[in-house]
Amino acid sequence: MDIQFLLNGETVRIAKVPATRTLLAWLRESRALTGTKEGCNEGDCGACTVMVSAFEDGQIRHRALNACILFLPQLDGKAVRTVEGLSGPEGQMHPVQAAMVEHHGSQCGFCTPGIVMSLAVAHRNGAQNFNDILAGNLCRCTGYAPIIRAAEAASQAPDASWLDTDIDKLAALTSSAARPPAEAQIFAPRSSQDLAGWFLENSDATLIGGATDVGLWVTKRLSSLGKVCFLGQVADMQGISVDENRVRIGAATTMNEVQDAIGKFHPDLAELLRRYGSVQVRNAATLGGNIGNGSPIGDGPPALIALGATLHLRRGTARREIPLEDFFIAYGKQDIEPGEFIEAVSVPRQTDALRCYKISKRFDQDISALCGCFNIHVNDGVVTTARIAFGGMAATPKRAATVESRLVGNAWNAATIEAALSAFDVDFSPIDDMRASAAYRLETARNLLLRYFAEQSEGRASTRILEVTP
Amino acid sequence: MSVSKPLPHDAACLHVTGAARYIDDLATPADTLHLAFGLSTIARGRIEAMDLDPVRAADGVLEVLTSLDLPADNDVSAAAHDEPLLSDGTIHYMGQPVFLVVATSHMAARKAARLARIDYSEQTPILSIDDALAAGQAFEPPLEFVKGDPEAAIACAAHVIEGQIEIGGQEHFYLEGHVALALPQEGGDMLIHSSSQHPSEIQHKVAGALGQPFNSVRVEVRRMGGGFGGKESQGNALAVATAIVAQQTGKPVKMRYDRDDDMIITGKRHEFRIDYIAGFSDEGRITGVSFTQYCRGGWAQDLTLAIADRAMLHADNAYHLENARITSHRLRTNTVSNTAYRGFGGPQGLLGIERVIDHIAHELGKDPKQVRDVNYYRPMSDAAKETTPYHMEVTDCVINEMVATLAKTADYTERRRAVAKWNAENKILKRGIALTPVKFGISFTLTFLNQAGALVHIYSDGSVHLNHGGTEMGQGLFTKVAQVAASAFGLPLTAIKITATDTAKVPNTSATAASSGSDLNGMAVKAACDQLRNRLIRFLKGEYAVKSQDIRFEDGQVRISGHETLSFAEVASRAYQNRVSLSATGFYATPDVAWDRLKGSGRPFYYFAYGAAVSEVVIDTLTGENRILRTDILHDVGRSLNPALDLGQVEGGFVQGTGWLTTEELVWDDKGRLLTHAPSTYKIPACSDRPAEFNVHLWDKGLNQEKTIYRSKAVGEPPFMLGTSVFMAISDAISACGDGRSYPALDAPATPERILFAIKAQQGREGA
């Protein structure tokens, strides 16, 4: 596979691109662009953040991404800016850079290029929710306060107009880029049909959505992946469509888009996804990947299971639909055949009763110790339906079936809740690990039902610490 | 004058443009070799057989070294000669380097390092403090400081409490992992670039490993991407490994740890358990207290003795203890060898007495602030002086006035009432508030380390070259010291060329540690600059027949009363042409410090730095989740050399301190395997974890009574301990969850899990 992309405004062509060479390693080792740093090599610290721009549906989109778990083939037809490519043609600093100097936003300076890039992307996009924008950029020196002061100051400055040259060049690049044919080792299909056909013949290949998980197989597990298939350009598996019955989300849709789109219907799921990874991770990670990797601690599945989601699977031309919870059979085992892939997820339209509770040691950018999602509908004071699903409580994302059964058909009151609490022990036998003990998980799972009840009851008590102001 | 201005970090423009070079960014020759350690997979035992053929056969591997292949000393320890670079057959912890892979790339070395087949005879590892106590594993016998008669005082006290607090360790998580680059020179000499706070120790360990004198090894450090104590001794292994392979192959050699390796191999903050008994009056005045500190040192001694000492030296924090016994156990375990970390044991010792105060307040039903107020050392204005448990007079105490000022500006009393009212109205969420002080002793307790050197040149064009023994890890030391030099010559900061720390320019340096960087190096640079200025003055006096006081260096000019004003460059040029030496070394040794650690008596510290913080938190009683709502800080940096940089140290230190006590949890399994060895599992504070409202001020009355550099005070470590206010505020919130009868004896870190179970314990007492 040959690729071309813009690097700091210049066109780069790479013939026979290595499938799993990361952008970070390539920048530092092959291009001597050492401003982009390796802090963790797993997408958690943000020191390697770069700006990646691309046209999507005719719109230019600018995204912050972690270069350490971004493979070169994923950049085909896109524009990359590193910290070295942010200053103006006369060497003038980007407003974010200038503000970081003025407000003492750097100390050791090692996280700084990544911070600058995250803020520069936000600046281009006009975003100012800095706690979220920087959730994926760890700084050990400053305590973040001066960085926020810099970010706020820079947000008043006009955008760096010189970066717009990428947009013209990108348009030319995108339209002239030769479309690679299907190859044996690397494939980047443009349609689900191409994907389905190729994957049927190459079912040993690894499908790569955003590489936020697979990236670590390379950088941490040190695996060689063999055949790979990049899903980033499969147009008909991206995006969200809504009709009167359901919301359908393409499997290659990034979590940021899922967050934006689903927020209209289920604000608490959007809030959950706001805490899913970081901006950089959500810009890459896909919903299909979040489900397909079968992790028991992914945050998407419990919420979607609680909503009664359907998984759309495809193998060649054969398609089937299953309830999402049935996909997860056991740890590391899912209901999926060789050559089969996740094409989409659909969620039935419903009155919003979903509440999602992500519990982790750190609020932002942490993996859940447990994630409880509750979707309980009450009619005339009686529970009509209850769908409760948890991540982190079993070897798979799992429904609290016994708890649900103790609720359905009963009055929505404290006595019913109390009677249901003991059923958590029936439904779940969680484990001790580095994130929490089994005892904490069980205790908290029970308490989350109490929280849900408190939130859905008359005279709603204050239940969310994020809503408490100084 | 440059000093006292809030100037930006000297490398700020380089940082934000990505142009600041760290060692892994340096251009290296194409034939550079790369290294990785093969790590032990058990925590304790012997290597019975080792098959390294698969490693040797791996792609890109040139060579694999074991301890038998080393040319001279197999030791990378800081002091005790107990830390082999490569295992000599005995395994002391899981993750111990066993063999060294030499390969053509970093990735090739890492991949190959996992291919060894090693047979071990495994022994049960000694992991916990209790394990070590039971096995009698310690680095030295327990040490004890005694003042007065604590047992008698406790026996006749009106009230007595007993308790225990467990205090977790902390990973440094410098953003730049450990890295070293060795460039072989002619005649067997070696140039090392190391990400180290202690270039002289790197020099010594490399020389020892190569069997060469110190003068054959030159170590250069321009900057680190964070240190926090984690690069005081832990960089030795990489530097020594690269030097050995460079010597053997004649090629440049680089080694950097992948983040997971870094966290698995290198030492961390010491875990502690502190047992306490305290007797006190109705007012809460402590009449007698006894602490037993248990310190988990890990497998090798490293800096553990000095760290445990400093924990003892901070068992009083800002409180006068008339009768005190402080006993310290320095325990050896089969875990990473714990090392220096910002505060160096001080934070753990301090947390012990803060726990006691909090516990006393609960026992008496008082606001903890009231108990603190009756226990502080007398203010420096008071003629009568009090002594610490190690018999040093406290003559510079300003905590009383600082706390009073802070309580007022932070509206402590009113907010405490508001918190109580809010808690009465809210069932699920609870708030807590706490004010805690810091008093931190400044100086290396190993007295001879309190020295520094500098080298300053003025070139004939008037530009100045500055060098000293301190290292830059982000704290802004180079900027502060350059401000000292600029002030000496009346030059703008831009006229001073800041240069990399280099053992060939300033020898025999101490680590940049113990918050001492500006105190020591600032004075050494000032000494060098003063000499040069005096030479210029002497020269000008001869030229113009004026007196010294007629010559002033300011605004880049040299003004001579009654004569012309010269540019500094002209003066330099003319001095050169008149054969005046324009290069000087400077030296400084902290006066008046002397300390006998075994007797527990003397003056270990030149002075104390003070600070105080008020934090308010909210906790969720259903989950243990928590947030800091607001923090107000007042911190004493004496007369600031650079208020912007000092503020940065206070803000950053505080947040790092809160991380230690809340989200940062190191978890080992029962085999001794560290489970939290990456940022995915080990959680340092993220952006939103800083206080939602964060008011930080330097104390405007700050003035060091000792003759430090421009009367400033050290600032690196003391603010770290302001994070204690958050821990105590969480404790306060938990105590609002029950009937108030039981004390929430919270252990650190206060993770959601610990908080939830502490709340449960509180609620369990209801109606009991």
Image: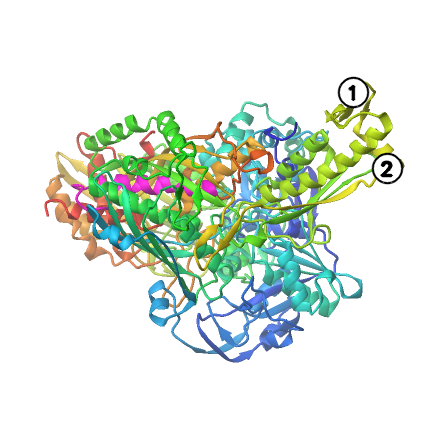
Query: Could you classify mark 1 by the number of other residues whose Cα lies within 10 Å: few (under 14), some (14-19), or many (20 or more)?
Result: some
Residue B561, numbered label: 1
Query: Could you classify mark 2 by the number of other residues whose Cα lies within 10 Å: few (under 14), some (14-19), or many (20 or more)?
Result: some
Q: Which residue is mark 2?
A: B576
Say which residue appears at 48% left-offset and 62% top-offset.
B337
Residue A266, image x and y in percent? 32, 35
**Is residue A70 visible in the rendered structure shown here?**
no
The magenta stretch is B718-744
Residue B726, image x and y in percent? 36, 40
Q: Amino acid at mark 2?
A: Tyr
> Where B643 sits versus A211, above or below?
above
Q: Helix, strand, or loop for circle 2?
A: helix
Say which residue appears at 36% left-offset and 35% top-offset.
B615
Colouring convention used in this rendered image of the protein: rainbow
Say which residue appears at 32% left-offset and 39% top-offset.
B375
Snapshot quadrant of residue B333: bottom left
Chain ID, mark 1: B
Q: Amino acid at mark 1?
A: Ser
